[in-house]
Image (spheres, rainbow, N blue to C red):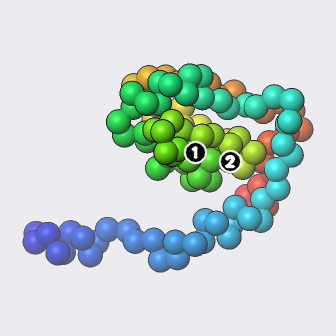
Amino acid sequence: MPIESKNQNRARILDPAAIERKLALNTFNVDRDRAHIRIIDHDVCLQCIRQQCINSCPATCYAPQEDGRVLFSYEGCVECGTCRIVCNEFDNVEWTYPRGGFGIQYRLG
């Protein structure tokens, strides 16, 4: 099968902004006293070449910094757990469920 045919059969994102619109409908009860996810050692992120957490987080909670470190904001986390899975080389993400009553409240199921 030619390469062009294979590429035509792949799924495409028809509306790239759709996820942002759907995330905007959700509400978050942020626990200011306890972050349920944290980067254990920010200096370890300097050793990570791919920094997959930045690209894989559907809520874009991870942001690259100019010095090579990664900034994480747990307030908009959708609790999918992807970050702890993709940080398998250094295991530098500590992830726990939020305390009862805190975290995301999905509006679209």
Q: Give x and y (percent) for residue 36.
A: 73, 31
Q: Nearer the viewer, mark 2 or mark 1?
A: 1
- Mark 2: few, some, or many residues within 10 Å (few <14, many ≥20)? many
Q: Tag 1, which secondary structure? A: strand
Residue furthest left as drawn? 2
Task: From the viewer's side, name the closer residue of 31 and 104.
Answer: 31
Q: Is residue 67 left or right of residue 99?
A: left
Q: Which residue position is annotated with label 2?
A: 78
Disc 2 and disc 1 in contact, CB within 8 angstroms: no
Residue positioned 18% across, 75% down in the render = 5
Residue furthest right as drawn? 101
- Image vertical order of residue 51 relative to residue 1, above or below: above
Quadrant, the C terminus? bottom right
Amino acid carrying mark 1 in the image: Tyr
Task: From the viewer's side, name the closer residue of 109 and 12.
Answer: 12
- Image vertical order of residue 2 relative to residue 29, above or below: below
- Does residue 18 show up? yes
Q: Give x and y (percent) for residue 72.
A: 63, 40
Q: Give x and y (percent) for residue 108.
A: 74, 63
Q: Which residue position is annotated with label 1?
A: 62
Tell me the CA gap for discs 2 and 1.
12 Å
Q: Tag 2, which secondary structure? A: loop
Task: From the viewer's side, name the closer residue of 18 and 63.
Answer: 63
Q: Is residue 9 left or right of residue 53?
A: left
- Mark 1: few, some, or many residues within 10 Å (few <14, many ≥20)? many
Residue positioned 46% across, 38% down in the render = 68
